[in-house]
Amino acid sequence: MEAIEKIKEVAAQAVPGAKLEIINSTPAAQQPALLVDRDHIYAVAKFLKEDPRFQMDFCSCVTGVDYLQKADNPGFIEVVYHLYSVAQKHGPIILKVRAPRELDQCRVPSLTSLWRGAEFQEREAYDLYGVRFDSHPDLRRILMWDEFTDHPMRKDYVPPADYEWEPTPHHDTLERTVQVGGITPPTAREELEKARKK
Amino acid sequence: MIQPLTEEKQFTRTPGSEGLIETQTLEVSIGPQHPSTHGVFRMDCVLDGETVVALKPVMGYLHRNHEQLAERMAWLGSMPYTDRLDYLNSMSNNWAYALAVEKLAGIKVPEHAEYLRVIMSELTRILNHSCVIGFMLQDLGAWGTPLLYAFRERERILDLFEAVSGSRMMCNYMRFGGVRVDMTSKDLAVAKNIVSRFPRFLDEFEMLLTGNEVLLARMQRIGILPKELAINASISGPMARASGVEYDVRKIDEYGVYGRLDFRVPVGNVGDVYDRYYIRVLEMRESIKILQQALHDIPAGPHVAPEVKLRNFKIPPGDGYGRIEAPKGELGFYLVSDEGGKQPYRYHVRPPSFINLTTLEDMCLGHKVADVVIILGSIDIVLGEVDR
Amino acid sequence: MGFIGKGLLDGMVVTARNFVGSYFDKERLVTVQYPEERVQTPENSRTFPFLVYDDNKNPVDTMRCVACKICETECPPQCIYIVMDRDEKGKPRQRPKVFDIDTSVCMQCQICVEVCPFDAIKMDNDYEKSRYGRFDELVEHLPDLLKSNEYYGRIKPTEATVVDAKLKAEKEKKAKKAAPAGAKPPTGSKS
Amino acid sequence: MAVDEGLRSELQKQGIFVLPFEQLYNWGRKSSIWPLQFGLACCAIEMIASAAARYDLARFGAEVFRATPRQADLMIVAGTVTKKMAPLVVRLYNQMPEPKYCIAMGACAISGGPFKDGYNVLKGIDRYIPVDVHIPGCPPRPEALIHAIMTLQRKIANQHLETENRLRWYDKNAETEFPIPSYGDHDLQPPANCEVWQPPRSYRDVTLDEVKKA
């Protein structure tokens, strides 16, 4: 299979106007990804699926990643697609698409109409990260119950305070105990105060 | 004396669209507590008479936040949690995670350890497939017998796992760059014994099942999954191969030492429940072939790469995806490391049985409700992996 | 394919083979009559952690644990809780005052054993731990956890021999080092 | 007790068993515990293994795994109870006929175990229903489950029909149905059933002096 630079070049030719960017993985893994803008992800994916040079007919893995705000960038949710080809037995080509973290703007086009295999995985990304996939056939929560309102895999999610008593509490559990007013072992309380003083 | 029905109470025959009695569709929720849903899985079926006209899988009853927990602890800390993903085959889950981390960190695994991993992973495959056939037959109404035979064989393999790794089910055996403890010569002898005796059990198992009239009647032409749909819906593992997709990560990626081992990838041609059953039997036979080679060829050497630290293990920033052919399909780990690199920033599991459920509705439509149970059984799901 | 009813007959044959075989073949007779007879658990078998001490007469002073809290931080489900013992002046005493393991949380992963640099914590193989209550009976405190080195040697002979030899060598090395240095007290170095 | 111990053992040698009705009744109950066929997660596989040929739970009269709660006496909560599943577990327990028992098998069922820090994991089934026997372990060996069944049998054998320690079933005022939590926006409502769930009020701080004494 061609190098990622070649794929980028070919895809840019095939889908005019697409903003493509190469993102490197860890040095050892050697799995560079192609970052595509939201408006052209569908066209790029369709091209990769249908072009006889690639024939990416197998969408293996779809997932979301939450990048919190950092000094220089405002933070975003990234959706990652790992594509393989069963027909030509090569891969992966990794597509990434980014959306803002705000819930009302966090939308990307769904690729379920290209690959059925993305259906449940996109639902999962919606459930856990709050990414709305436009034109997904059945975008409901898949793992949590329907009444649930949060998106728990986001990095700023605060779990419910159902903490009551634990014999061996640690770190944030200990903090939460004090907030909720639960009972802590006296020695644990001492330790916590000491840690706070530091 | 029985009173005749009054005018209002009499059931009137109003002709439906085809001149028959007008009927209503019935919604049945199978699960989450149901003996044949293999755990806490729910299927919302809409039935017309006994025929399924719509079916929606509902999951999440075993959603244990595996991914979020892993993002809070060190790289090594997630290893025992991977055991609990697909709890029938912890060894291959370990391998998938170790492989992904090794890919990210660029660790080279000693050859001896690679062979140990192959041995453990193939034993797991045998164990998984024999148990799954047992469960599948249980769903068919063969109450107990095949399952008991399968569990008898499972115990023998578990005894070996316990002797080597210390635990029957949750082995926590693999480490980054190798395995935790070496197999002694005694353990290897036990493994050889298991491998040499397993075909006898398999023959007996097949005599009981393959070609049995009831089995054929219940399994053939049921739940057919066409090849194109299987690829498009990202189906992997024995299920995809039963539909004629010749795709095995062991052959494609040649991870570990699979490139050196000689084995065949069995492929079905109909893609019905019976093919899925028989593919598993054939895969067990291939696994035995692999095991014989691996146990014969295993070289001496260290069981873990000596440069890998147990504590304060760090990975440079970036991401990566590692996958293996687990008994249920392609099991992958997508890991992202951040600055510091002490723990995963993002840890995602690509669970084969979750994605294999995508086409459950397509396979069940038009079949009877009793077939739904066996179609689900043939997908081979483990809820720990579906919901994570 | 054969005649009608072949599948039934085959099934009967398999069942009969297993039934009759169980009288002659040990491998077909698998049932272990549990409370009376037990499966011989292999040496590696593990259930819950315990703390090793060396001298039977004085378990508290000869326990190997120095309360370094490595196992507490590395424990994946965070079921270990340690408080270091201090004397009246607040100087650390290099041994735990409180050492709790919540067995109702412990996932038996053995990571605490692997990371312990002092060979102080080891895995037990006792599995009969069913209890009526949850907190009082399942949280193990220091007195429940302390077990002698002989016990460890009894349940895991091979492993214990290696550990004993290693500790002995370390001790001799330390003694050699300490001898020329003179009156300097040995300090518990962290590896 | 009307019959004196010495006489009773003397009679037993002759093959005559003199028992109070209560003991006979309890013997019958404890030798035919029918568990609910209900597996949640990993521990369920070990539960099946203990019912399979090698460990053979049938030797304790407990092999009849019933698929419906209406025919079961014992609920083995084998595996992680998630918040999505918890209302259903409580409902199943409510549907079982009295006298009923509950074994929390494995770390997850007792306290949430290794997964207790998660947003969707219930920190122990004893928050909603009373648990009779706890088996620690992740997962417990099949022998451990059998040991738990034996522990439960001991408990049943010591239950009375009339005194303070009588069965819940014979206490007219006792609770037999437990409130089922509902799915809330962020968590289950209520997060625990205060009448069943009582965390300890104090913590035993063990000092070294106590250890020395022991």
Image (spheres, rainbow, N blue to C red):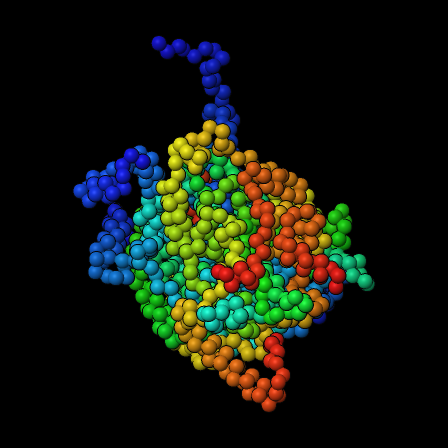
Tell me which residue sits at (48%, 42%) in the image. B33
Q: Is residue D37 visible?
A: yes
Residue A53 x %, y %? 63, 66
Tell me which residue sits at (38%, 59%) in the image. B154
Residue C27 vertical placement versus B176 (above, below): above
When asked about the image quadrant of residue A17, the answer is bottom right
When asked about the image quadrant of residue A100, the answer is bottom right
- Residue, far right: A72
Seen from the viewer's position, the closer of residues B153 and D7 is D7
In the rendered image, the quadrant that contains the C terminus of chain B is bottom right
Residue A39 vertical placement versus C171 (above, below): above
Tell me which residue sits at (39%, 67%) in the image. C42
Residue C62 x %, y %? 51, 71
Horizontal relation, residue C163 to residue B336: left or right: left
Horizontal relation, residue C89 to residue D149: left or right: right
Tell me which residue sits at (56%, 76%) in the image. B108
Residue C172 x %, y %? 52, 84
Number of numbered discs visible in the structure rendering: 0
Q: Is residue B242 visible?
A: no
